[in-house]
Amino acid sequence: MSEKYVSRLKTRYMDEIKPQLMKELGITNPMAAPKIEKVVVNMGVGEAIVNKKVLEDAYAELTAITGQKPVINKSRKAIATFKLREDTPIGTSVILRNDKAYDFLDRLINVALPRVKDFHGISGKSFDGRGNYTLGIKDFLIFPEIDFNKVDKTKGFNVTIVTSATNDQDAKVLLKLFGMPFNS
């Protein structure tokens, strides 16, 4: 009988972060403590209108970074100024839940972000008002899973961390305890 895999960061959340979070926020019910619900990784590729290979590359790179197959996002409506037709593939995204979300966050916080050149922390103001945080990454080469010799053009992507926190302050405390390097 094999043991079930549990993410290192999730174990740390259950053992250390959750009790500390409950103490800091004055929560008595353990079920009310904020937690990570999902992580959405989205890569928009506007060049895919002209060059389909760019979207294929983005798909492969996002698969390597997240360890899960992305979905292809299509345009909802036509925009003539961008030469965009309805239902044209223009991006790719992944929704990570449970252990995969914690594993991705672990790699983002401890491996990828420290590899950013001239890194001084991330903005603490990118919360949406409901406890969710969005981070834009300009260059995906900071992830060790990407072989930079095989990359034609660098692309950026967005990471949205969806928490069960009801406000931004609680979510910021949660992410700080995870080790998110906020600069403000």
Image (tube, rainbow, N blue to C red):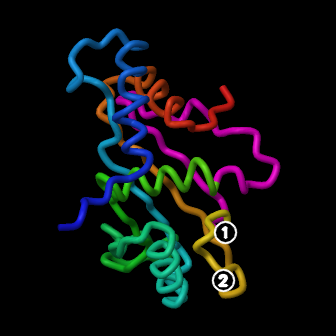
Q: Is residue 74 visible?
A: no
Q: Determine if the magenta segment contains residue 159.
A: no
- 54 lies above or below 166: below
* Dot 2 crowding, Cα within 10 Å, few <14, some 14–19, many 20+: few
Determine whether, in the image, residue 81 is placed left or right of residue 39. right
Q: Are marks 2 and 1 in contact (CB under 8 Å)?
A: yes
Picture coordinates of residue 154, whole percent (x, y): 67, 73
**Whether residue 24 can be seen here:** yes
* Amino acid type, callout 1: Leu
Q: Which mark is residue 141?
A: 1
Q: Position of residue 104 (x, y in %)?
A: 46, 57
Q: Which residue is mark 2?
A: 151
Percent x, y of residue 170:
41, 22
Give whichever of discs 2 and 1 has the lower sequence position: 1
Q: Quadrant of residue 168?
A: top left
**Residue at point 32% right, 29% down?**
34
Q: Which residue lies at the image location 76% right of the left edge and 46% below the top edge?
A: 119
What range is drawn magenta here? Answer: 113-141
Secondary structure under the numbered disc 2 in the rendered image: loop
